Image (cartoon, grey):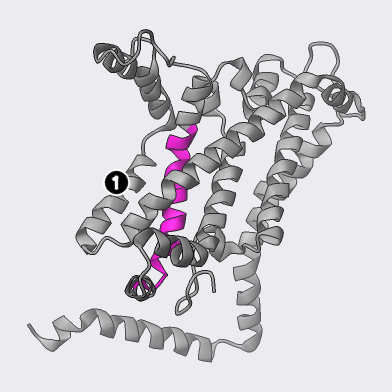
Amino acid sequence: MYPNQRWGCTRVSSKTTRIGERFLDITPNSAKDNLGYVIIGIPVALLVVFFLIPTLYLFATTFFPREGSGYYQIGFTLEHYARLFDSPIYGRYLWTTLELAAVTTVISVVLGYPIAYWLARVESPALKRGLLLMIVATMWITVIIRAYAIQVVLAGDGILNSLLLDFRLISEPITSSTGYIPTIVGMVYGFLPFAILTIYTSIANINPKLEEASRNLGASRLQTIRWVVLPLSKNGIAGATALVFILAIGSYVVPMLLGNPSEWTLPVIITEQVNEQMNVPFGAVLSAVLTALTIFFFLIAVKVLGLGSDQLIGDTPEGETDGQ
């Protein structure tokens, strides 16, 4: 192998770097400043066009009156907000949304932590890559397919009940294709990979020698995890909690397919109001409530838990130990 072939990638990379530096040297200062504005302005413009303006229009729609069974018209009214606060049923839907999100978050973090710890301590790089690929691959499956698969497993005459009945562990089916348990199972199935990957990144940044030192001083494995690993991975736990909870609040497909009306969440009710009732302003009111809740819990994660963008994705700056 010739030297040029062996180090070709490095030379190309260095050449590309030199070309970039030469380009910046010959670029006028004013052009450099304008280039900086362009680089910053593009994502800001996209944020304004695709988030800020639609959000403001959504908020304005909440005040538009609706005549009879028609669509809506430009105007101002507070009747939709009055309906929201006068009817207790929407408060129950809001509570159901928060409850399902909280239960999903707790189960996902509790199940995800030991899996993430085991993955982070797998010694074989090939095995670790394969296991991580398997976890990521579950996220590629369409949520509708996952929901119907859960229905097949948990149905009254499904796989789970049939096995339990065959082994005479139960006398009658204990699960159904829809309801509270299938909804929780579906949401955990969908959001557990997010918890695992977030916590995994945090634990992987902890130096294994700290655990080795703890074991050498007489601590058991469980004591080492309790007093060494858990405190150092608190950012990953908090990041996974915030991420899963915020995602679960906006879950629509799983509660719609696996839940009964008592397990419907605000996203399901919003869709029902817009598509079936054709009441866009009231759907906008519910959407504004959901958006406000999402922003509120995000601010809690950032301010109260002290999480920034790095912690929310479970990252730790290079050279530092998570939790320090």
Out of 194 and 42, give the one closest to the viewer.
Answer: 194
Q: Quadrant of residue 120?
A: bottom left
Residue 273 within the magenta-colored segment of the rendering:
no
Out of 112 and 60, give the one closest to the viewer.
Answer: 112
Q: Is residue 270 above or below residue 128?
A: above
Span highlighted in magenta in the image: 187-208
Q: Residue at x 57, y 42 (%)?
A: 247
Q: Position of residue 274 (x, y in %)?
A: 69, 22
Q: Is residue 270 above or below residue 123?
A: above
Would you say 66 lies left or right of 178 here? Answer: right
Q: Position of residue 266 (x, y in %)?
A: 67, 28
Dominant SS of magenta comes to helix
Q: Residue at x 73, y 48 (%)?
A: 296
Q: Quadrant of residue 102?
A: top right
User: Amino acid under label 1?
Assistant: Met
Q: Residue at x 24, y 15 (%)?
A: 167
Instruction: Identify the residue at the far front of this view.
Output: 218
Out of 197 and 12, give the one closest to the viewer.
Answer: 197
Kind of element beneath mark 1: helix
Q: Position of residue 7 (x, y in %)?
A: 20, 84
Q: Is residue 22 above or below residue 228?
A: below
Q: Position of residue 291 (x, y in %)?
A: 71, 41
Q: Residue at x 70, y 20 (%)?
A: 273
Residue assigned mark 1:
134
Q: Quadrant of the C terminus?
A: bottom right
Please indicate, yes or no, whether residue 250 appears anywhere in the rendered image.
Answer: no
Out of 27 and 148, give the one closest to the viewer.
Answer: 148
